[in-house]
Image (cartoon, rainbow, N blue to C red):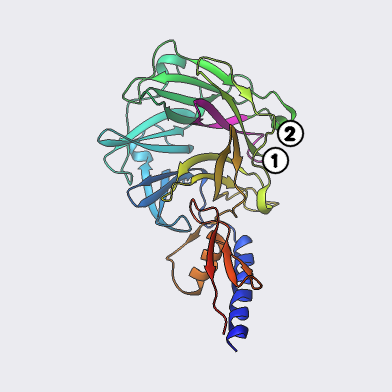
Amino acid sequence: MKRFLLLSLILTTVVLGSCAQNQPSAVPLADPYILLDGDTYYAYGTHHADGIEYYTSKDLVHWTSQGLALSKNNTTEQQWFWAPEVYPIGDHYVMYFSANEHLCVATSTSPCGPFEQVGGYMLQSLIGDEKCIDSHMFIDDDGSCYLFFVRFTDGNCIWMCELETDGITPKEETLRHCISVSVPWESQLGRVCEGPFVLKHNRIYYLTYSANDYRSHDYGIGYAQLRALSGTWSKYAGNPILQRKEGLFGTGHHSFFTDKEGQLRIVFHAHASETEVAPRGMYIGTAAFDGNVLTIGDAPIIRPVIGDDTGVESLRLKANLQPSLYNLLGKRIVTPFRGLAVMQHRKVLFP
């Protein structure tokens, strides 16, 4: 009888895990960015017409909508609030975002906001009123700050400049081109290299980006690398590293973060379905370096839901976050992924 009950539990959990695989994300954020501050994850992204909204979570699976972190009432622009990032700098938080196709910056004493815009267009001194989008701030090991962003100088292409120590003011004469569309997979719809994000590993810089128009099912993620920011970026021959994964389409415009267990994570958006682009949803995967190659992990993608971790819903969602393979002959449960652990074994006792 006990053996039968255990087998039933195993089959139920496997089915629930399968259902979780097909669960779409309930967090409607495009161009998502996740900040871990204290014991709380904050997710910001493109979605609300009146500013930048945010969600909070304790476990990356269950999320709660918290309203607007940035309202258009506290900005100079009134439309197209896109691609935010939030960083703690000194005693305040800095939000980088696009509004009306211009780069702006806002500050707050809390990751919840309210954020208020600082000055006018962030890059006014370098490019005047020229339109640009998708700002990303990178802090190097020596504390130097750099801004990576998208200009429309050759389709959508990625440029960079250095910032003063305040993380806001661009340094004169530091504007440099990084990458443009140059290989076939990037131009299946439009000429687009956008959504930059920079990682550093083994003293190598990795400029990750999204290519193709965001409305394309083949919107995907690749990267380029170099050893000195004054050098020339070289694109990885194995690009794209993320595209059409686990039945998702339009997988792109991402950011990276480290979770509570120290695991490198990637958060990205995907289309609503195979036929509809909007509303795009937020998804969370794993990433790692294999030597000097940046890879997307094999752990199943987290598909966020709205609500608390309770009841049967909790069981189904945990199966999504930590899917298990049950080995009856070996009399053990094998968990392929949990935080940084490569493998964990839990014995099952039989009568």
Badge 1 density bin: few <14, some 14–19, many ≥20, Cα 10 Å: many
Taking 35 as reference, is 2 left or right?
Answer: right
- Residue 191 in percent (x, y) is at 67, 27
Residue 213 screen position, x and y as percent: 65, 35
Assign a secondary structure to mark 1: loop
Cα gap from disc 2 to disc 1, whole angstroms:
7 Å
Is residue 248 in view from this perspective? no
Task: Looking at the picture, tell me which residue is in the foreground, 114 or 223.
Answer: 223
Q: Report if residue 312 is visible in the image.
A: yes
Please report the residue visible at 51 percent of the width from the left and 64 percent of the height from the top: 318
- The location of residue 100, given as percent across then percent down, is 48, 32
Locate the N terminus and report the quarter of the image it occupies. bottom right
> In the current view of this chain or complex, which residue is farthest to the bottom?
1
In the picture as drawn, the residue positioned furthest to the top comes out as 173
Up the image or down, 308 lies above or below 147; here it is below
Residue 188 is labelled as 2
For disc 1, the marked residue is 218
Assess whether residue 211 is covered by the magenta stretch: yes
The amino acid type, in three-letter code, at marker 2 is Gln
Q: What residue type is labelled 1?
A: Asp
Disc 2 + disc 1, Cβ < 8 Å: yes
